[in-house]
Image (cartoon, rainbow, N blue to C red):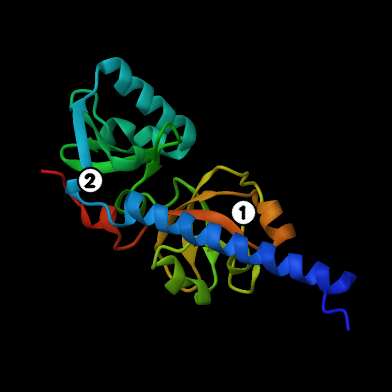
Amino acid sequence: MDSWPGEHGLESYYTLCNGFISFVLNYWHSKLKLVLIFRFSSEEISGQNQVRASVQRRIRQSIADEYPRLEPLLDDLLPKKSPMIVVKCQNHLNLVVVNNVPLFFNIRDGPYMPTLRLLHQYPDIMKKFQVDRGAIKFVLSGANIMCPGLTSPGGVLDDEVEEETPVAIMAEGKQHALAIGFTKLSAKDIRTINKGIGVDNMHYLNDGLWKMEKLE
């Protein structure tokens, strides 16, 4: 008897292998992000400097462009007369710090994202996605947000959101955001594809960045 799988068996075999490879890649991607932010501490800081006025203006404008609702508040959050410090950390993580308080972060030259503490003060500055109750414990452990957690009953998508967009991650039955995410897919693709990672989990409640209220 020929033990080699038939046409349908071979197709199932490849599907299984591809699924396993995808799982492994997603697992290690999550592990890398844990090193980037979730276990962040002052020991990860590699340098910091007070930026020039021109750089400060550029950062302010970038933040205003990304979050138009925040623009009227920027003079209070990022006063022109207060020193702005950019703290460089390992793995290309940058923090924007004013009066010793981390307010925004980005990775490499990516968009600036507010810290959760800042978002809780100004909850309407970002586009929002909502996960269902079942996804909460996974998000709070640092896992990326899977498409089914956003499309199932209890999940909510903003169909205007495109891929590579910072979003606030809300949760069914909860008032405040529990994470900051960065979309891998547009909201429409998340709804259509409905499998795999929809949003990268960049920063969540009680991670290293959350615990660092001030940099002394």
Other residues around mark 1 within 10 Å, as few (<14) / some (14–19) / many (≥20): some
Discs 1/2, front: 2
Residue 43 place in picture, x, y as percent: 17, 47
- Is 216 situated left or right of 181 in this image? left
Q: Which mark is residue 44?
A: 2
Quadrant housing residue 149: bottom right
- Callout 2 secondary element: helix
Question: Can I make out residue 174 in this image?
Answer: yes
* Precedes in sequence: disc 1 or disc 2: 2
Report the quarter where the N terminus lies: bottom right
**Mark 1 lies on residue:** 158
In front: 32, or 53? 32
Q: Residue at x 61, y 54 (%)?
A: 158
Which residue is located at x 50 percent, y 53 percent?
200
Q: Is residue 58 above or below residue 176?
A: above
Task: Give, as a three-letter code, the residue at label 2.
Answer: Glu
Residue at the extreme top? 54
- Classify 76 as above or below 5: above
Taking 119 as reference, is 18 left or right? right
Is residue 60 depicted above or below 89 in this figure? Answer: above
**Three-letter code for the amino acid on which mark 1 is drawn:** Asp
Numbered disc total: 2
Along the line of sight, the residue nearer the viewer: 91 or 74: 91
For label 1, the SS is loop
Residue in view at x 20 percent, y 52 percent: 213
Residue 172's x, y, as percent?
A: 50, 71
Q: Quadrant of the C terminus?
A: top left
Q: Nearer the viewer, residue 201 or 31?
A: 31
**Disc ID at residue 140:** none
User: In the image, what residue occupies the spot 46% across and 64% down?
Assistant: 143
